[in-house]
Amino acid sequence: MFPTMDRHLTLIEGRGIVLRAASGSMRLARVGDGVAFPGEQALNGELIDGPVRVWNVMTRRGTVTASIHVHRNPPAALYAYDVALVIAGEFAWHSPGGHEEIAGTGEGVRAVTAVDAPALQPLCKLSQLLCTVIHTPVTQL
């Protein structure tokens, strides 16, 4: 358990997992399925059919928040992320040095800031990309 933390869990490989808590169960059965829950929540996991890999993002409550979005078969370039992970297919991106890089399944890109993130262009029809954005609350004076 992780007191004061908020968690986001997204299935990135495998046939799925069922997470059970006192309040009920959550089923992640397809790559890209995700769930958000408080870190204090006790969970038990049961694999559906073999091993899985998950993307686990934890943020300190009241300090920052996160949003995770899976783009399935994106038609155009994607921007505005802090961390992007290719979960299927390939994406092209232009590095700060000006040359093109290719990121394939299981590879990722970390941006200095979400605003300055390089564009990621899908290179095949079934490409899928998981994008994580970290949000810092605005301090009011």
Image (cartoon, rainbow, N blue to C red):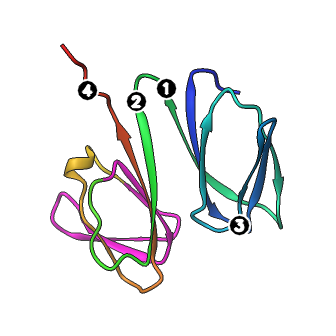
Q: Write down the residue under mark 3.
A: 14
User: Looking at the figure, which quarter contains the N terminus?
Assistant: top right
Q: Which callout, 2 or 4, points to the residue nearer the camera?
A: 4
Residue stretch rendered in magenta on the structure = 81-109
What is the spatial separation of the Cα atoms under label 2 and label 3, in whole angstroms?
30 Å
Q: Which callout, 3 or 1, points to the residue nearer the camera?
A: 1
What is the spatial separation of the Cα atoms under label 2 and label 4, in whole angstroms?
10 Å
Q: Position of residue 50 (x, y in %)?
A: 82, 65
Q: Write down the residue under mark 1.
A: 60
Q: Position of residue 125 (x, y in %)?
A: 42, 86
Q: Amino acid at mark 2?
A: Val
The residue at the point 42 percent across, 35 percent down is: 65
CB within 8 Å, label 1 to label 2: yes
- Judge left or right: residue 78 versus residue 98: right
What is the spatial separation of the Cα atoms under label 1 and label 2, in whole angstroms?
6 Å
Q: Residues within 10 Å of mark 2 (few under 14, many from 20)?
A: some
Q: Is residue 104 visible?
A: yes
Q: Residues within 10 Å of mark 1 (few under 14, many from 20)?
A: some
The residue at the point 33 percent across, 80 percent down is: 75
Q: Write down the residue under mark 2.
A: 64
> Which residue is the extreme one toward the front?
23
Q: Residues within 10 Å of mark 3 (few under 14, many from 20)?
A: some
Q: Amino acid at mark 1?
A: Arg
Q: Write down the residue under mark 4.
A: 138
